[in-house]
């Protein structure tokens, strides 16, 4: 199973979801290959925002990732692509070939479908709130995957 987390710049929400999914899946014995990207390329090559890395570190979650932009081949290469919000989902839907549209979902779909807000312009507490939302959503998706998923 290959999962891609997608937000706008790939330095806040999607790398956080990337780290959480990787960590929580491993804890459950679910084999998932996780990556993340942004629909934009503004931060390509950069590490995740220091506030994202700090939240993950506090929760014992390692993250070794540099931002990248969504590629056309991602739609074929990944089994599930999770958008952090409606705008990024719409961008993905416009680019996605019809045969892969069934793979596109909002991350918070199983927990009410709301957006994961972008914490970039706020304080550190916004990153903590995003962590809680992402963790709840990731756990809900993992509940749907049997142990040993490949």
Image (cartoon, rainbow, N blue to C red):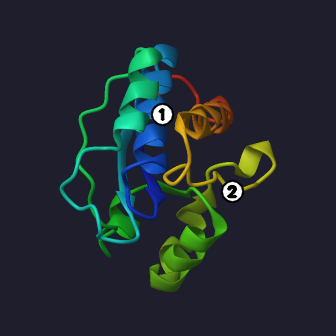
- Discs 2/1, front: 2
Look at the image and tell me whether residue 3 can be seen. no
Residue 35, how many percent across, how many down? 34, 47
Q: Quadrant of residue 74?
A: bottom left
Q: Nearer the viewer, residue 120 or 150?
A: 120
- As drawn, is 124 to the left or to the right of 49? right
Element type where label 1 sits in the image: helix
In the picture, which quadrant includes the N terminus? top left
**For residue 21, which numbered disc appears in the image?**
1
Extreme residue in the right direction:
112
Q: Is residue 19 above or below residue 89?
A: above
Q: Name the residue beneath numbered marker 2.
A: 115
Residue at (49, 52) in percent of width and height: 120
Residue at (45, 64) in percent of width and height: 8
Dots 2 and 1: beta carbons under 8 Å?
no
> Disc 2 versus disc 1: distance between alpha carbons?
17 Å
Element type where label 2 sits in the image: loop
Q: Nearer the viewer, residue 110 or 10?
A: 10
Q: Is residue 114 above or below residue 93?
A: above
- As drawn, is 8 to the left or to the right of 112? left
């Amino acid at each position: 199973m290959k999962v891609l987390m997608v937000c706008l710049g790939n330095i806040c929400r999607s790398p956080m979801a990337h780290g959480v999914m990787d960590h929580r899946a491993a804890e459950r014995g679910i084999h998932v290959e996780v990556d993340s990207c942004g629909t934009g390329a503004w931060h390509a090559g950069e590490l995740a925002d220091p506030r994202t890395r700090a939240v993950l570190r506090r929760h014992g979650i390692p993250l070794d990732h540099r931002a990248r932009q969504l590629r056309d081949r991602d739609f074929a290469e990944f089994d599930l692509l999770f958008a952090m919000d409606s705008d990024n989902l719409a961008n993905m839907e416009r680019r996605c070939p019809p045969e892969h549209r069934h793979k596109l979902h909002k991350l918070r779909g199983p927990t009410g479908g709301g957006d994961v807000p972008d914490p970039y312009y706020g304080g550190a507490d916004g990153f903590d709130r995003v962590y809680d939302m992402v963790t709840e959503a990731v756990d809900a998706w993992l509940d749907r995957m049997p142990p040993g998923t490949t």
